[in-house]
Amino acid sequence: MERDGGVTGTGAVRPPSNPAGGRSAGGLSDAPAGGIATVTAAAEKPVRSLIGCGANLGCPREQLNQAIDMLRFMPGVALLEVSQFMETRPVGGPPGQPAYLNAACLIETSFEPEELLAMLAAIENTLDRRREQRWGPRSIDLDLLLHGDRIIENERLQLPHPRMTTRRFVLEPAAEIASDLRHPQAGCTIGDLLENISQRHLHVAVVGIPGSGCPEVASAVADVTLSRQLHAPAALPIAGGPDGTAAEATAFWQETLRQYAAPLKRSGWPGDPHGTVADYWLETVRLAAERCLAPAGRREFLTAFDRLAAGTVPPHIVLFLEVGRDALRERISYCRQPIRQSDVFADLVCSGLPETSEAEALLALQDDLKCCLTGGSAPRPKAVIRFDADDLGRTVNEAVAAIEAIQ
Ligand code: A4P
Ligand code: MG
């Protein structure tokens, strides 16, 4: 990534009309196309918000400066810091796009995040932003990366920004001005996130239930990044494993765990710069076993798990593939056909359960995984990106873009 002069850190700049830094204003009408929305109602305590800026059409430097000036003089917004501008290679989208100029701004505001998003869209519209193609070239793009510790997930707004944790073009400028700002889901700072993707040998895990497409996506990501590939050493049993006593079930799950942990051992882990892409995560084995074992066996298994897991290398980045019920059922039916045309979804081995029960057992495991990766309090990998895995072609493209964004 090339750095260039651009705007240097501006220090605390506050709009003259709003010396209190965000107390004067509140709500906002819907952003009109081509103009800044109007401020209307009262609002809450000011919070710090991080905004990612990018442009690769027209005069990117001029558009970034104009967008930053609009933020600087926006009533109800105090512009605290602006990063340098950095020239970056386009990630994702159509081939042949011009290079981007990226930057980050730290502001303080009392606006609700939805209001702020509408203000950012209004600034984009003023600067002639066209939305013809996802990830297509643009005169300006303003993304709301963080808004205090708010976590929001709806159709219009996702907070923190869902793709920021692997994007160097976001994290480098952001770390320059707000290295200590915390990411509420990752449980670490922006500086930590940048360090996380800057490891010499990155460990990426593509995680999901059997049938979500992990082997296919992992293989595509490994090919593009020339990484070493690690495959799950055995099919993940989802119906409890072979019949037998409780003790046999515990022994079976411990053996499965041992097989899964062996390739991830710290001793012998490579240090070359190409990285490792695994199509599984050790925690998936723990969650599956916990669903299948009785309490005594579960305790014994968890003791073995803690011991073995401590000697393994956890992933720096998790690409979590989430599949919908209908797509999963279709894949299960496909895998049960006597003659298959390809070995795609080969990790879906027949459990002996009826199709519907197998789908429900897998979806229950997927819920556990989701809880572990996106909520909850357990330590989780710093960078987790979720993908809708119903359309495998799209998932592959997006997963590859997420990993390419690290460079
Ligand atoms: N949206 C949801 N959450 C947010 C949020 N936290 N911040 C919605 C901003 N917008 C959010 O955005 C599409 C929709 O996302 C909006 O309707 C909004 O309600 P958009 O700006 O209209 O379109 P987009 O930017 O093409 O889509 P997207 O998915 O936001 O793309 P990204 O993730 O912003 O990536 N390569 C380099 N080197 N530098 C870049 O800056 N940017 C992108 C765009 C791709 N490659 C890049 C760069
Ligand atoms: Mg955007």
Image (cartoon, rainbow, N blue to C red):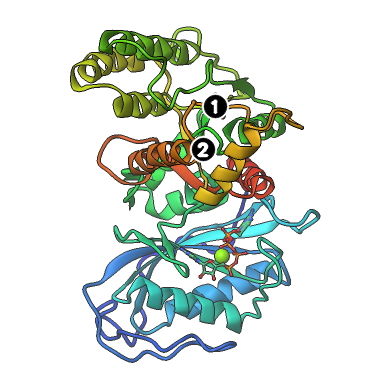
Q: Quadrant of the C terminus?
A: top right
Name the residue: 52% across, 21% down: 235
Q: Which mark is residue 355?
A: 2
Disc 2 on helix, strand or loop?
A: helix
Query: As displayed, is residue 65 above or below residue 253?
Result: below
Residue 23, located in which quarter of the rendered image? bottom left
Q: Is residue 277 visible?
A: yes
Question: Of residues 279 and 67, which is closer to you in this image?
Answer: 279
Nearest to N terminus: mark 2 or mark 1: 1
Q: Position of residue 277 (x, y in %)?
A: 58, 27
Q: Secondary structure at mark 1?
A: loop
Across and down, in percent, residue 386 comes to: 49, 47
Compared to residue 108, the image places residue 335 above or below, namely above
The location of residue 185, given as percent across then percent down, is: 34, 48
The mark found on residue 350 in the picture is 1
Three-letter amino acid code of the residue under disc 1: Cys
In the picture provided, is 296 more to the left or to the right than 316?
left
**Residue 389 seen:** no
Closer to us: 76 or 252: 252
Residue positioned 58% across, 48% down in the render: 327
Is 17 on the left or on the right of 84, as rendered? left
Q: Position of residue 171 (x, y in %)?
A: 49, 49
Q: Nearer the viewer, residue 374 or 269?
A: 374
- Mark 2–mark 1 Cα distance, whole angstroms, equals 9 Å
At a point 64% along the width and 76% down the height, the residue shown is 129
**Ligand 2 lies in quarter:** bottom right
Q: Residues within 10 Å of mark 1 (few under 14, many from 20)?
A: some
Mark 2–mark 1 CB contact (< 8 Å): no
Q: Residue at the spot x=56%, y=36% of the render?
A: 211
Amino acid carrying label 2: it is: Glu
Is residue 79 shown above or below 70?
Answer: above
Q: From this view, report whether residue 278 is shown above or below residue 38.
A: above
